[in-house]
Amino acid sequence: MSSAYNQLLDATMAHLEDLKSKGVRNVSVHAETLRALASPATLAPSRPAVVDSGSPVLPKTTPRPTQVMAMPKRLITSMVTPSKLAAHARIVSAYSDKAAAFNELQTRVLVCLKCASLASSRTNVVFGVGNIDSPLMFVGEAPGADEDAHGEPFVGAAGQLLTKIITAMGVSRAEVYIANILKCRPDTPGESSGNRKPTLAEMATCIPYLHEQIDLIKPKVLVALGATAVEGLLGKTVGITKLRGNWQTYRGIPLMPTYHPAYLLRNQAMSEKRRVWEDMLQVMEKLEMNITLKQRGFFQQATA
């Protein structure tokens, strides 16, 4: 067998061990994939690199949009048992191109039915958005009504504020990657509006998808937006007030906890805005981004 095959096989086994350690016992796949399991896996030909001009602020990235797979809302999928998981992972690991692997992940997420109540109540699966080669990734807790309607994270009022924060950092929303712990909006039975916090069971079920996203993107810095995002990523239930502004570590990746933008919509005190901005300044410094004197002075209280 070729060395490339052996490398892929080793990577597959490492990935399976990682999934097993997280409690993953099955994954959902299409019927076509199940049929493909009976055939030898072949490597997808690598595609020519797309040359694109990157941002002067984040020069080490080459933005390339992910393809959004249009899937029927209630497509029924088959479950792969643990005995078939290795064969399935062999197909997944055969992707030599990050975009192809990301699309395969997105395909699985868009048809996920693991949380029956969320799958039946959702309008759209909210996978994620942005540059999959970005060194900076933001993680929130779960989609709200606006996100569920549009199929994109952080598009409501809190999302608009997040976009302003990102812009103030000197980059565009399209240059970073944004995702949530949950890919479906938590259902609110009997209520026509409002959102609720994801349950521990929902987070445990859905977060392997986020782990895969992070593993593929390989950001240099993660920003956890709010206490629920911190709990999902780190398992810590310490209040966000105590954690924010203090570097944490997720699988070797520096992680900055900060307030969720929704908090700033409720508490618009200049001091709270400044705290979040100080967190972002730390992120910018960690990424060795250019920081102007004007940026360093944002949201400071005026002195007499």
Image (cartoon, rainbow, N blue to C red):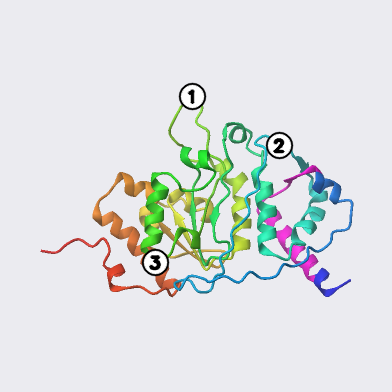
Mark 3 or 2, nearer chain start: 2
The reply to whether dot 1 and dot 3 touch (C-beta < 8 Å) is no
Main secondary-structure element of the magenta-colored stretch: helix
Residue drawn at the location 20% of the way across and 61% of the way down: 301
Name the residue beneath numbered marker 1. 190
Q: Which amino acid does label 1 sit on?
A: Gly
Q: In which quarter of the image is residue 289?
A: bottom left
Name the residue beneath numbered marker 2. 75
Between 29 and 150, the residue placed more toward the observer is 150
Mark 1: few, some, or many residues within 10 Å (few <14, many ≥20)? few
Secondary structure category for the residue under label 1? loop
Mark 2: few, some, or many residues within 10 Å (few <14, many ≥20)? few
Mark 1 or 3, nearer chain start: 3
User: Viewed as shown, does residue 35 lie left or right of 221?
Assistant: right
Q: Nearer the viewer, mark 1 or mark 3?
A: 3
Instruction: State the image coordinates of residue 21 (x, y, percent, origin top left).
Output: 68, 56
Residue drawn at the location 78% of the way across and 70% of the way down: 7
Label disc, if present, on residue 170 of the rendered structure: 3
Residue drawn at the location 62% of the way across and 62% of the way down: 215
Instruction: State the image coordinates of residue 198 (x, y, percent, origin top left).
Output: 51, 41
Secondary structure category for the residue under label 2? loop
